Image (tube, coloured by chain):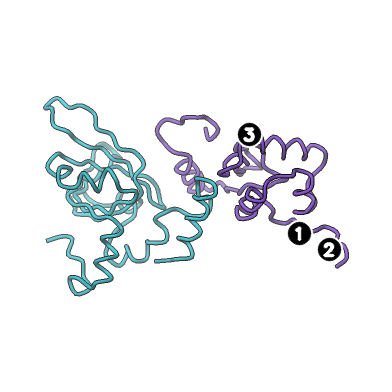
Amino acid sequence: MDKRELDLFLTESELMRVSASTQIMAPFREDLKKYDFIQSAALKWKIHGSKVKTAGRVIIIHTPPTKSGKRILFLTLEDEEGIFDLTVFEDVHSRYAKKILAGTVLLVEGVLNRFGLRGVSVVAKRFWTLREFYERLRHGRDKGKLYFLP
Amino acid sequence: MLNAEHVGSYPKSVILNEAKRKGIEIRGPHINESREDYTAENGAIRIGLSALNGLGPKFCERILRERDNGPFTSVKAFCLRTNLPQKIILRLSLAGAFLGLPLNARRRACG
């Protein structure tokens, strides 16, 4: 974790409500890269159906009504390289609702869904918070490896 | 867009980050350059004084009114002319609003 960058972000956000110098994900990027969390720009190059791990700051959460009556969450997340969309179906968000609705930053594992010419969205399967990520790292659980995917 | 009260669903930080990604420079608030709101400045975006927490419209107006009489030449001159609370001066200082200004113009002049 880049503490200097994190301090800069927190100071600017506390002073101005916005950070002009850095994005919230930047201080954590090195650690996230080690565990194959990719950025939004890289998502565009992944093939349909591939398993991906990504992370970002939650910008918007939509829960529009659906024909079937099932509740689907559409999230927009932002990282240093841009914004991207997540789709969370009922079976997943019933398990992770607290993390999704309360979290500022989310770590996600899911399946990439391509639509149209450029449309990309991640169908989320699992969520972690940054705290959980760093707790795992600190306690050396999984012997230094994070088994996010089978 | 940044000065609109409600821009679609995107917060200002996202718009600023997107501007940065498009290569637009984001300049911090400055007592001699910033207006009350966000402004375009030679192809860059200058953050307005009102973006600072605690700096309400009254304080912004006081700074801008004083600046109309001439730019601030030092931090001391700023404090004397605007008579703002110390807390606000500290916030401005932390946000880099005094960058390039000497603490005291006379001290600089004396070398």
How many C-alpha atoms fall within 10 Å of the one at disc 2: few (<14), some, or many (≥20)? few
Picture quadrant of residue A120:
top left
Discs 3, 2: same chain: yes
- The disc numbered 3 marks a residue on which chain? B
Relative to B38, B13 lies left or right: left
Residue receiving disc 3: B57
Q: Are circles 1 and 2 on residues that touch, CB within 8 Å?
A: yes
- Residue A5 against residue A58 in the figure, above or below: below
Helix, strand or loop for disc 2: helix
> Which disc, if any, is residue B103?
1
How many C-alpha atoms fall within 10 Å of the one at disc 1: few (<14), some, or many (≥20)? some
The chain that appears cyan in the image is A
Helix, strand or loop for disc 1: loop
Q: What kind of residue is marked 2?
A: Arg
Relative to B73, A34 lies left or right: left
Q: What kind of residue is marked 1?
A: Leu
Relative to B68, B41 lies left or right: left
At x 19%, y 74%, the residue is A143
Q: CA distance from mark 1 to mark 3?
A: 25 Å
The chain that appears purple in the image is B
- The disc numbered 2 marks a residue on which chain? B
How many C-alpha atoms fall within 10 Å of the one at disc 3: few (<14), some, or many (≥20)? few
Picture quadrant of residue A36:
bottom left
Q: CA distance from mark 1 to mark 2?
A: 8 Å
Choose the circle earlier in sequence order: 3 or 2. Answer: 3
Choose the circle earlier in sequence order: 1 or 3. Answer: 3
Q: Position of residue B81 (x, y in %)?
A: 79, 44
Residue receiving disc 2: B107
At x 67%, y 51%, the residue is B86
> Of residues B18 and B39, which is closer to you in this image?
B39
User: How many numbered badges does the structure rendering display?
Assistant: 3
